Structure formats: structure tokens, C-alpha cells
Image (cartoon, helix red, strand yellow):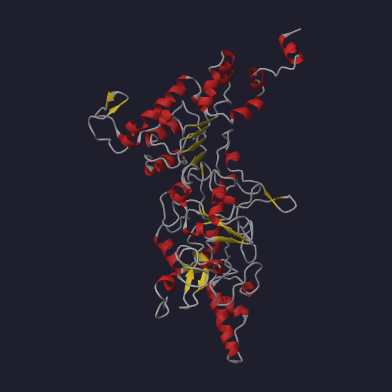
């Protein structure tokens, strides 16, 4: 009787080496092991060491964001020019550049992996929040032959020169590039790491409330309670949920990354996408301030899409922007990279959206509906993240309808037809279904959102009553959430200061 037969006859489980020879079991187990755990396992016996180091599938995914060897002490980040400061028991060379100084620890870790013969197998490399990540190191990872990285994450790295990284990306994506280059297929740089404090990236609307309907899991739920689920690294993905602002870069101002995304389109994917479909849909009805800003700053270049609106479409008619990408029908380059990066290192797995199901557990088509902040001016609720398309809310048509009602009340005999009204509007959309909406009705002349509280932001007619109250003493409106010292009936001013003498004008 052989040894294996004896072990199976005695009921003893097979050795770990035999389990790791199965590629399916190996892939499942390795994904739960950190890099130090793999090295500790390899030191147990020679058979495991040979099996792990000779299999290229083991080191396809490496996360060095928590590697102690790549960590730069905080006291070194502000004392570069102190001449007597030592590094690794050696006096700092005067000819040492700043990038070489910072990248020293991480280069040492990568050099050790190269000597072990596993660096060539790395296809997904995570370097989040490492101060030792510099432009020179990124240049080597992208261009050097000893690397084969396809997905790279450099989110929130302190010493990365973004301008130089953008120049590098434009160079490797040039039309005259050699065939088969670049090896890099995806770059994570825009979203925030999961280890970052959620409070550091909260917007004022995170303290508002969700209402029953689109984007809500109950009749009344604080958004701050579900932010952890929607942020990258949480239980869901923020790009395919009505989570509002997803990235901060490019949200309030134009950024030079917009030209880089345009130059790398179809070659390198990012964890962000440009606002193209919503921008084309909202162009005729843009707010005057938004139109002027986009015309004066990089006209013709779409801004970054920083707001996720969920797959349900417009709050009035349910329509999505024309040409919005649908998974399985659109090109994968139109979708952003999702976190976490796949262990396989394949781009299609990195951009694959989560499944969308209905009440009957049937799979629905997954749509990506995102927008920039300028396209949604005065038509997006920052609490429940409803939004209205150009047909459901057109300020020009809405104003004309209000004028028509006033003329009708005055008893005038002649009223313009709807066709004449459409011709005078800036867009060719119909205005008759502004009064008939499925989820939230907007009356003629009424704004889609209002801003009664600075912290709450612009909210719709369903979200405003949840936090806005009218003081019974001074008859002024106040926010119940952000006015300290108030209650359901009296504002903070009247509660502690004896009340106002006059009502506020604004």
C-alpha cells in the first residue's frame, strides 16, 4: 500500500502540498494570503517553497501598501535637506535626487522580489499611500523589461508628480508607439483608498437623509450610515449606485488629467471616466454659469465625471443619457476601473460591474450613469441623488409654462401653442410632460432643487421637508440637522436669544 493510499485509508487529510498542486484550490487560497504569509509558508518546507516560487500564478497580485520595508518614516518627509540625517546607517549623498531618496525603500523591496525571481510574474501591483512611490519608479515599472505590470494602483501617494506621470502616459500611448506596448492596461489614481478616513472625504450632503425611492433602502436613512458601503473598498461599488460624488479631483475645477484620459482612450483605462454622454445630453440646457465656465476653460474637452447617479435614470421619466454605456453592449474602455483590482490582472475583470437584480432576482442590464458637476447644476439632489433630464426640467420651457398660466388666469383669448413654445426654447425637447412625472412632480416655474441650508446642499422637494423647519416665533426657516440648539418648533436664535425682532430677508 502506498503512502497516499494509507493516508486516505486512515482518514488523514491530504498534505497541503497536494492541495496546492490543484490550480483551482491554489488560486482560491492564495487570494486570502498576504505577501508575508506566502513567504512564511514557503519557509516551512522545501516542497512548498519550490511549488510556490515556480508557479507564476502565486505572485500575480502583490499589495505593498502595508509593507514595512517600503515605509518612509514621517520625520524624513520634512527633513530632506538636513545634512547630517542618516539613511540606512549611511550619510546621505549630496548628489542624491529627491526621487531617488524617497524611492529607496520601495526599490529595495522590488529588487529583493526580482532576485527571488517572482517580479516578472506580478501583473497587479498595489502601492497605495506609499511615500516611496515617485515618478522615476513609476517610469521603471511601466517601461523596464523586468516588470510585467498590467494593473497599477498609486492612489494617494504623497510624492508622485502628477504632471510627469501624465507626460509619461501620453508618451506611451502615442500613435507611433511600438506594437504590443504599453504593457500597462489600467491605472488607479483618482479614487480614495479604503484605509483613508471616511470623514476626510465626506461632502456636506453625507449628513443629509435618503428618502424612499431611488437610492434609498428604507423610508428614512442617514446617508452617512451607508457611505462605508458605497466607498471603494466597502460592500458595494460607488460608480453603480446613487452615491453622489465619487472622486474629488476635477469636481470643482478643471484638471489636466482630462487631456490625459482623452489621449489614453482605448489604450489605458483609469478609475474615472470623462463626462461625455451626459455632457452631450445637457449641452442645450446648461446653466449660464456652467456654460460660461466650460467655454472659457478647455472648450471641447469633456470634464471628468465625478458624480455617480445609479442605473435608474431620470427621476421623472426614467430615461438614461443618450449613449450611456451598458455592460455587454458597449466597449469595455467606456467603464471605469473598480476596486479591488482583480487577482487575474485582466482588464475586463477590473471594469466588470456588479450584478444588478430586480425584486424577482432576475439579472438586469447594468448601466453606467455618471456626470460632472456642471451638467447637473440646479437639477441634482445632493441628498437622495435624484436628477432630471433636459426634457423633464428645462428652465426655459418651465418659465414659459408659468407665463402661460398667468395669461390664462388673466382671461386672454390668445395663447401660444406648444409647438411655438418649443421653438422658442433652447432645446427641442417637449415640455408637456414636465407636469407628469413618475416620482417627483415639478410645477411650472418651480426649481428642481433648492438650497435652504449650506451644509445640506441643493435638495429636492422630497428631501427638503425632512430637515427644514419653520420657527413658530420668528417664522424663519432653519435646518434641524445643522443648527445646534434648535428643536422641532423653535430655531436656535429664538431658543437662546429671546427671538428675532424682524424676519430674515434671505
* In the foreground, 110 or 460: 460
Identity of the residue drawn at 52% across and 41% down: 267
Q: Where does the image place residue 253, in percent across and percent down from the top left?
A: 41, 56
- On the question of residue 334 being in view, the answer is no
Q: Is residue 246 above or below residue 319?
A: above
Identity of the residue drawn at 33% across and 31% down: 100
* In the foreground, 59 or 40: 40
- On the question of residue 420 being in view, the answer is yes
Q: Examine the image and state in which quarter residue 340 appears.
A: top right
* In the foreground, 114 or 12: 12
Residue located farthest toward the left when viewing the structure as drawn: 83
Q: Is residue 416 above or below residue 45?
A: below
Say which quadrant the N terminus sits in. Answer: top right
Does residue 13 appear left or right of residue 267 in this picture? right
Does residue 451 appear left or right of residue 366 in this picture? left
Identity of the residue drawn at 53% across and 45% down: 232
Q: Where does the image place residue 30, in percent across and percent down from the top left?
A: 59, 28
Say which quadrant the C terminus sits in. Answer: bottom left
Amino acid at each position: 500500500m502506498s503512502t497516499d493510499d494509507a493516508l486516505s485509508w486512515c482518514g488523514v487529510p491530504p498534505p497541503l502540498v497536494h492541495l496546492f498542486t490543484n490550480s483551482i484550490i491554489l488560486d482560491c487560497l492564495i487570494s486570502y494570503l498576504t505577501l508575508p504569509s506566502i513567504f512564511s509558508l514557503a519557509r516551512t518546507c522545501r516542497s512548498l517553497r519550490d511549488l510556490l516560487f515556480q508557479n507564476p500564478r502565486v505572485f500575480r497580485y502583490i499589495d505593498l501598501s502595508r509593507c514595512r520595508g517600503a515605509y518612509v518614516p514621517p520625520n524624513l518627509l520634512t527633513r530632506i535637506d538636513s545634512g547630517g540625517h542618516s539613511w540606512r546607517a549611511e550619510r546621505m549623498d549630496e548628489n542624491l535626487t529627491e526621487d531617488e531618496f524617497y524611492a529607496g525603500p520601495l526599490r529595495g523591496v522590488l529588487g529583493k522580489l526580482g532576485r527571488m525571481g517572482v517580479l516578472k510574474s506580478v501583473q497587479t501591483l498595489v502601492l497605495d499611500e506609499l511615500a516611496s512611490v515617485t515618478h522615476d519608479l513609476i517610469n521603471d515599472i511601466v517601461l523596464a523589461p523586468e516588470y510585467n505590470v498590467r494593473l497599477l494602483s498609486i492612489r494617494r501617494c504623497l510624492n508622485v508628480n502628477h504632471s510627469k506621470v501624465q507626460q509619461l502616459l501620453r508618451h506611451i500611448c502615442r500613435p507611433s508607439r511600438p506594437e504590443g506596448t504599453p504593457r500597462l492596461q489600467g491605472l488607479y489614481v483618482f479614487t480614495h483608498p479604503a484605509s483613508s478616513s471616511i470623514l476626510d472625504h465626506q461632502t456636506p450632503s453625507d449628513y443629509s437623509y435618503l428618502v424612499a425611492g431611488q437610492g434609498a433602502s428604507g423610508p428614512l436613512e442617514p446617508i452617512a450610515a451607508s457611505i462605508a458601503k458605497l466607498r471603494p473598498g466597502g460592500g458595494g461599488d460607488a460608480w453603480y449606485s446613487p452615491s453622489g460624488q465619487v472622486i474629488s479631483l476635477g469636481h470643482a475645477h478643471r484638471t489636466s488629467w482630462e487631456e490625459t484620459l482623452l489621449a489614453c482612450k482605448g489604450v489605458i483605462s483609469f478609475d474615472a471616466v470623462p463626462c461625455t454622454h451626459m455632457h452631450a445630453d445637457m449641452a442645450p440646457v446648461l446653466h449660464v454659469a456652467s456654460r460660461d465656465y466650460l467655454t472659457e476653460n478647455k472648450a471641447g474637452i469633456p470634464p471628468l465625471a465625478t458624480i455617480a447617479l445609479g442605473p435608474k435614470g431620470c427621476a421623472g421619466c426614467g430615461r438614461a443619457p443618450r449613449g450611456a454605456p451598458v455592460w455587454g453592449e458597449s466597449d469595455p474602455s467606456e467603464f471605469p476601473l473598480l476596486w479591488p483590482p482583480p487577482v487575474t490582472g485582466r482588464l475586463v475583470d477590473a471594469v466588470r460591474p456588479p450584478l444588478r437584480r430586480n425584486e424577482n432576482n432576475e439579472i438586469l442590464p447594468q448601466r453606467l450613469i455618471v456626470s460632472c458637476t456642471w451638467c447637473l447644476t440646479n437639477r441634482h439632489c445632493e441628498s437622495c441623488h435624484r436628477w432630471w433630464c433636459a426634457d423633464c426640467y428645462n428652465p426655459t420651457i418651465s418659465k414659459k409654462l408659468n407665463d402661460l398660466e398667468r395669461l390664462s388666469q388673466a382671461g386672454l383669448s390668445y395663447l401660444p401653442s406648444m409647438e411655438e413654445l418649443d421653438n422658442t426654447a433652447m432645446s427641442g425637447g417637449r415640455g408637456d410632460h414636465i407636469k407628469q412625472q413618475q416620482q417627483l412632480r415639478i410645477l411650472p416655474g418651480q426649481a428642481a432643487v433648492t438650497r435652504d441650508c449650506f451644509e445640506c446642499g441643493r435638495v429636492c422637494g422630497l428631501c427638503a421637508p425632512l430637515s427644514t423647519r419653520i420657527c413658530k416665533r420668528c417664522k424663519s426657516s432653519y435646518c434641524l440637522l445643522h443648527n445646534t440648539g434648535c428643536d422641532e418648533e423653535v430655531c436656535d436664535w429664538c431658543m437662546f436669544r429671546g427671538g428675532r425682532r424682524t424676519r430674515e430677508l434671505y
